């Protein structure tokens, strides 16, 4: 989502114990109020944990294994999408703002949320992580990478903070007509969770035209393979941050993935990015 970064890999050994399940620093009452401001439909749609559990995770696991991405349909309600997008002008909710053109990242802008995260966003991060962690661990096993991820997101965030990665990475992106995002990988330190989620907050054809989510996959000694992931308002895509394993004729090998957003042809597009590791 944000920057066009060079490919990196750094193995980081994580303990397998459960440990203390501390909440991210500063999470508290301010974040919890957002469940109502991000849409009263939250209760009717079920809690984020209920929604996460309702997905077909066998299908998601298979899609991630075969394509490097999987769609989570209707992760958010329309009211929640509008509520989250409405945060964008509220600078006190964010720790920093990035204008992509200033850094060669593309065109458009995004803001990183500050801790405490809005309650709905924190709950989604907490609910999705334990579903994705077994997939991440299996991938690392296949790629012969020693890193293993703990069962809960609280444990993983604690490990990030021990590694000096203490800044939250969930972000809100805004694109206007003509904006786009270069292909990149979201790596913010040596400790990086290998899967992330992006949710589309606006409706294609009504709020904007263009602005498709794009993945490219580079296999050894082969041309890159592009993949356009169609999304509607409230849909999310789970996808590989940098590598995934692929079965070849001579065994498992790693492919390198990058993601971006094609040019928005008209209107305004908002996206919520849920990255599970914190940044230095």
Image: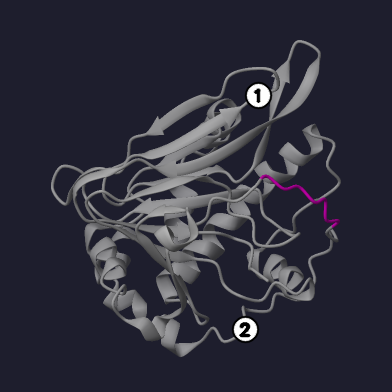
Q: Give the range drawn in magenta.
A: 7-13
Residue 91 lies, with reference to residue 43, above or below; the image says: below
Quarter holding the C terminus is: bottom right
Q: Is residue 47 visible?
A: no
- Residue 105 is left or right of residue 10, and the answer is left
- Residue 90 is left or right of residue 185, and the answer is left
* Distance Cα–Cα, label 1 vs label 2: 39 Å
Give whichever of 173, 155 is nearer the camera.
Answer: 173
User: Which residue is located at x 45 percent, y 29 percent?
Assistant: 227
Give whichever of 14, 105 is nearer the camera.
Answer: 105
Measured as percent of width and height from the top left, residue 28 is found at 51, 87
Q: Main secondary structure of the magenta part?
A: loop
Residue that mark 1 sits on:
219
Q: Can residue 52 be seen in this view?
A: yes
Measured as percent of width and height from the top left, residue 50 is found at 44, 57
Measured as percent of width and height from the top left, residue 262 is found at 35, 40
Q: Which mark is residue 11?
A: none
Residue 240 lies, with reference to residue 278, above or below; the image says: above
Q: Residue 25 carries which label?
A: 2
Measured as percent of width and height from the top left, residue 128 is found at 53, 55
Of the two numbered discs 1 and 2 on the same chain, state the one appearing first in sequence.
2
């Amino acid at each position: 989502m944000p920057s066009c970064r060079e490919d990196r890999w750094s193995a980081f050994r994580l303990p397998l114990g459960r440990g203390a399940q501390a909440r991210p620093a500063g999470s508290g009452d301010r974040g919890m109020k957002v469940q109502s401001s991000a849409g009263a439909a939250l209760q009717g749609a079920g809690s984020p944990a209920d929604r996460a559990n309702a997905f077909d995770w066998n299908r998601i696991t298979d899609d991630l294994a075969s394509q490097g991405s999987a769609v989570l349909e209707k992760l958010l309600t329309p009211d929640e999408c509008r509520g989250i997008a409405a945060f964008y002008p509220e600078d006190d909710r964010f720790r920093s703002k990035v204008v992509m053109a200033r850094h060669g990242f593309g065109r458009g802008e995004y803001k990183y949320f500050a801790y405490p995260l809005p309650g709905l966003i924190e709950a989604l991060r907490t609910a999705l992580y334990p579903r994705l962690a077994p997939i991440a661990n299996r991938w690392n096993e296949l790629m012969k990478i020693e890193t293993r991820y703990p069962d809960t997101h609280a444990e993983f965030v604690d490990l990030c903070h021990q590694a000096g990665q203490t800044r939250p990475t969930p972000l809100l992106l805004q694109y206007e007509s003509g904006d786009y995002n270069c292909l990149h990988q979201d790596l913010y330190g040596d400790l990086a969770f290998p899967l992330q989620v992006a949710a589309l907050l606006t409706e294609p054809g009504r709020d904007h035209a263009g602005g498709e989510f794009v993945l490219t996959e580079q296999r050894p000694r082969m041309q890159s393979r592009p993949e356009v992931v169609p999304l509607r308002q409230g849909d999310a895509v789970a996808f590989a941050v940098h590598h995934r394993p692929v079965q070849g004729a001579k065994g498992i090998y790693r492919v390198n993935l990058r993601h971006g957003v094609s040019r928005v042809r008209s209107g305004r597009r908002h996206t919520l990015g849920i990255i599970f590791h914190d940044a230095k």
